[in-house]
Amino acid sequence: MSTQSEPNRPTALRTHLCGVLTSDDIGATVRLCGWVARRREHGEHLAFVDLRDHSGIVQCVIDGTVEARSEWVVAVHGTVRARPEGTVNPGLATGRIEIGDCTVEVLNEADPPPFPVDDRAEADEPVRLRHRYVDLRRPHMQRNLRLRSKVNAALRAAMARQGFVEIETPLLWAPTPEGSREFSVPSRLHHGNFYALPQSPQLAKQLLMVGGFDRYYQIARCLRDEDLRADRQFEFMQLDLECSFASQDDVMGFVSEAVLDAAEAATGERPPPIERITWADALDRFGTDKPDLRFGMELVDLTEVFAQTGVKAFSSPTTKAIVVPGGAAFPRSRLDELTDQAKRAGAAGLAWFKVVESGGAGPGPALDGPLARHLSAEETVRLLERTGAVAGDLVLVVSDRHATACTVLGTLRTAIGGPPVSEGPHRYVWVVDFPMFEEGADGRPQPAHHPFTMPYAEDLARLATDPLSVRSQAYDLVLNGWELGSGSVRIHRKEVQEQVFAALGIEQAEAERRFGFLLGAFRYGAPPHAGFAVGLDRLAAILAGEENIREVIAYPKTQSGADLLTGAPAPLPAASLAELGIRVVVPPAR
């Protein structure tokens, strides 16, 4: 793992990094510091120590024996020389040289590590997290966190270059309506009252726009008390930005430049300009508002094909299909699994057709499956024409409400054909024109993003009469099927904000209680403004080729939310609870 481009500034204890030494340094006297990666002794007169620091490994040759074991911290003083003929190691960046005439100073001894500190063997994750300080020495973790540092530096440079000012917002804040569960912090000085840890700096940055800081950004720490998964932790970092007197296109331009700069810094190649798709098209073509553009299997609309059908299974308002190339070879057990998955995703059922050779019954391919014999000849022909399916393919069909048919097939599309999220190429896409609201479980509108998103001007008149048809000026950035971030043009006029609150059933008194400080600010000259936030953990994970954001976070939590290194969360002492005015009530056993 060579890092020859890194500055090699000497310190009091060392003159060079291990991995940056080359044939150009032959003859130089050096002092290196690091960990013993490997020790080999050849009798009593010769020993080899592979010395490792974050930049790589170099071989040190000692005349005599050496008392330095695996992961001991040592300093080595010696002279750079060419390796003898026949001993060059082409697999090592420093493989043409070694350090000779060495003296070794032990700076600290170490117990044997709980797992090998290299990438040849993968330890169980709980063991890695429990000894994270050892795990972080491994080349893959060093690479990931240093890559993440490059991403952060590139983002900061891009934002500064585009005229943005970095401002920190509070971690102790009031609750905000971001749609996720918040972490609460009890107040010692105000018993019975709590701060909320911010889900994002949303309201704080809007107030900065009112305050005249017309281009703000920060790399912000945010917290959400949500169930953890591969792309989610309780704590996460985001590039957060807001801009006054700017349109949706302006903000998307600022973000695109920063993200593409970061990708180039991390990978050495600049991605092409980011394409754009509407939310409606994303749902129709890919069955999701987080489309993965790296593979095909796009949804096909068969509603017209079955408009006059006598097959009850296809009589719903929308009928959609996907084609699985080569899927006719799926066994019945796999088809049953897909049917169960479709039902779990919300469908009443799943119809499947294997495309087979006609076998002389007529020209072209034929369909085989439980419902194949119930289709008319015309329906069979039109289904094959619309889908483009050929012999050996599998056609999966869902008939339901439009949103359900699309999302179910989108789920199956990803499950069957989706490559790992970290696998190239990296396909960025902007998704725009989201609905302003979505229907909640109680049938009432709820924000599709958050209630501070500006509707399109031409849709404002329908806020009171048909809110579910209103489009918002919201936009998401998606990479390989993962949502990197969301943003929108914000509401800056008090009367529009009140209309949106009314559509959500938030009465004026409640709005004043929850958001009075924001509504009050709108009375003092709020400029038009828009913003965005990019999830840095997800971006860094994909650029590093990882499937889980824990691999680009120094101290992550487990899937259950535990910190195996420190033992958190843990009970507070009774004295601390008393000081906070808190009494713990143990819930009854289930």
Image: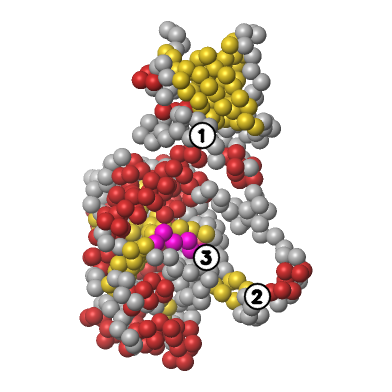
Looking at the image, do the residues carrying marks 3 and 1 touch, with CB atoms under 8 Å apart? no
- Which residue is pictured at 23% across the width and 65% down the height? 249
Task: Name the residue beneath numbered marker 3.
Answer: 224
Compared across the picture, whether 457 is left or right of 28 comes to left
**Quarter-wise, where is residue 400 in the image?**
bottom left
Label 1 sits on what residue type?
Answer: Ala
Relative vertical location of residue 316 with respect to residue 393 in this rendering, above or below: below
Label 3 sits on what residue type?
Answer: Arg
**Sequence-first tag of 2 and 1:** 1
Task: Name the residue beneath numbered marker 2.
Answer: 188
Helix, strand or loop at label 2? It is: loop
Task: Name the residue beneath numbered marker 1.
Answer: 12
Q: Position of residue 141 (x, y in %)?
A: 50, 40
- Structural crowding at the residue carrying mark 1, measured as other residues with C-alpha within 10 Å and reported as few (<14), some (14–19) or many (≥20): few
Magenta residues, start to end:
218-224
Of tags 2 and 3, the one toward the viewer is: 2
Of tags 2 and 1, the one toward the viewer is: 1
Q: Is-magenta flag for residue 192?
A: no
Label 2 sits on what residue type?
Answer: Arg
- Which residue is pictured at 47% across the width and 92% down the height? 509
Q: Position of residue 475 (x, y in %)?
A: 31, 66
Relative vertical location of residue 151 with respect to residue 301 in this rendering, above or below: above
User: Could you say which is closer to the camera, residue 103 or residue 308?
Assistant: 103
